[in-house]
Amino acid sequence: MAATNVVSVTTTNAEQEVLKSSTPVVVDFWAEWCGPCKMIAPMIDQLAGEYDGRIKVAKADMQQDQQWAAAYRINSIPTLLFFKGGQVVDQIIGAKPMKDLKLKFDSLLA
């Protein structure tokens, strides 16, 4: 279950929630059947709380909306895309340890 401050993103709301966001955004592309996605979900939720107000955290369910993921050529999940000013500035593909995720979040604020 996602934290209350994690936004669900689809093709319909991606422009407003991600591309036009005044704060940096991390989008977690995931699917219910994905084991590694489930492994990092609690870490993503924890980081969403730690960085609340500074970084927006969003989740994009690949099963419900493949169109937006296809636009960013997401071929493997989990994939985290880091957006700043509406542009992808970094990414993580696959499950990574908390320290690696935290480093990427911190670099997004630099």
Image (spheres, rainbow, N blue to C red):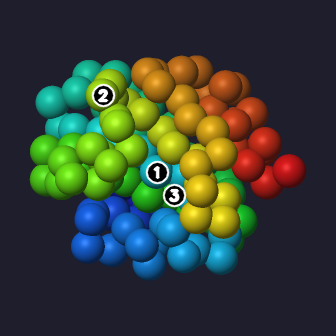
Question: Do the numbered discs 1 and 3 sit on residues whose CB atoms are within 8 Å?
Answer: no
Residue where numbered disc 2 is placed? 75
Q: Is residue 42 above or below residue 64?
A: above
Query: Upstream in the sequence, badge 2 or badge 1?
Result: 1
* Residue visible at 69% across and 26% down in the picture: 99
Q: Label 3, on which residue?
A: 57
Res. 27 mark: 1
Q: Would you identify the image quadrant in which residue 4 lies?
A: bottom left
Of the pair 34 and 91, the residue shown nearer to us: 91
Using residue 70 as the reference point, say whether residue 80 is left or right of it. right
Q: The residue tagged with tag 1: helix, strand or loop?
A: strand
Above or below for 36 versus 107: above
Q: Amino acid at mark 3?
A: Val
Residue furthest toward the right?
110
68 over 72 or under it: above or below:
below
Q: CA distance from mark 2 to mark 3?
A: 20 Å
> Which secondary structure lies at badge 3?
strand
Q: Residue at x 13, y 53 (%)?
A: 64
Quarter of the image holding residue 74? top left
Ranked by sequence position, the earlier of labels 2 and 3 is 3
Are the two marked residues, 2 and 1, in contact with CB atoms closer than 8 angstroms? no
Mark 2 against mark 3, which lies toward the viewer?
Answer: 2
Residue beneath the point at 33% across and 74% down: 13
Could you tell me how far apart the alpha carbons at marks 2 and 1 are, in whole angstroms?
Answer: 15 Å
Give the CA separation, mark 1 to mark 3.
6 Å
Between 45 and 59, the residue placed more toward the observer is 59
